[in-house]
Structure formats: C-alpha cells, structure tokens
Image: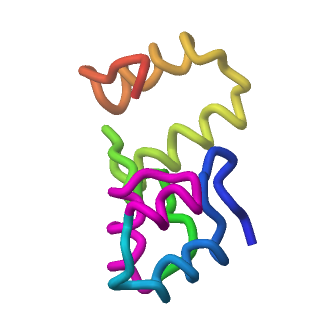
Amino acid sequence: MNIHSQARTTPKMREEIHASKGHMTLAEAVHFNVSRSTIIKRQNRDNFDDKYHRPHQLHTSLTPLQEEIVAQLRRSLLLTIEDLLVVVRGLIKPEMGRSS
C-alpha cells in the first residue's frame, strides 16, 4: 500500500477516526495531531486509502492518432523537441505550441 509522503494520517488512523464517529472532535484532533476539520472529513468517508492527486484525464491538443504519429516521428527520426515542433506545425497542426 502506498501512503502519500506528506499524509498526516495513515489508513489505520483514518479507520479509527471513522469508527469514533459522534465523539468529541476536538479531543480526537488533539489525540491524532490533526485539525478538527480533518476529523470531521474522515468521519464521513468510508474509504481509508489516499486519493490520487494526479488528474484522471489528461488534456491534449492532439487526437490519439496524431499523438501516435508524433511519437513515431520522434522515435524514428530522433528529432529534438524544437525540430519535432517544426515538423508538427508544418504537417499536422499549425497552431501547435511547444508546451503541448
């Protein structure tokens, strides 16, 4: 099980917090060394694992087919990013930016 590196609570602590639903939140917050709002939040959750902080859907400027073409160009021609951008702007998408 992966635990977020900056997590103040572990899954076991979160389970204990959830099980103590209805008790004084201030005393629990002091006991677990977290804020009162964290106690309230954890008492209302049924899942004790860390949530992913990565976007679930990445936004891209290209269609999947265009992405595959660009990846193949990069692998076969061994172009730098700047050279690849020139090729992509010329052949696939003229308004393509470097960050995309």
Quadrant in which the N terminus appears: bottom right
Looking at the image, residue 85 lies above or below residue 5: above
Residue 84, x across and y down, in percent: 54, 20
Predominant secondary structure, magenta span = helix
- Residue placed at 48% from the left, 67% from the top? 28
40 magenta-colored: yes
- Tell me the quadrant of the picture where the C terminus can be found: top left
- Front-lying residue, 22 or 15: 22
Counting every numbered tag in the picture gives 0
Q: Which residues are magenta?
A: 26-46
Q: Position of residue 81 (x, y in %)?
A: 58, 17
At horizontal 42% and vertical 17% (from top left) the residue drawn is 98
In the visual, does 19 lie left or right of 26?
Answer: right
Between 21 and 14, the residue placed more toward the observer is 21
Instruction: Determine the residue positioned at 52% across, 38% down.
Output: 70
Q: Position of residue 82 (x, y in %)?
A: 54, 11
Q: Position of residue 18 (x, y in %)?
A: 46, 82
Q: Please check the rendered image and state whether residue 98 is part of the magenta-colored stretch, yes or no.
A: no
Above-or-below relation of 72 to 1: above
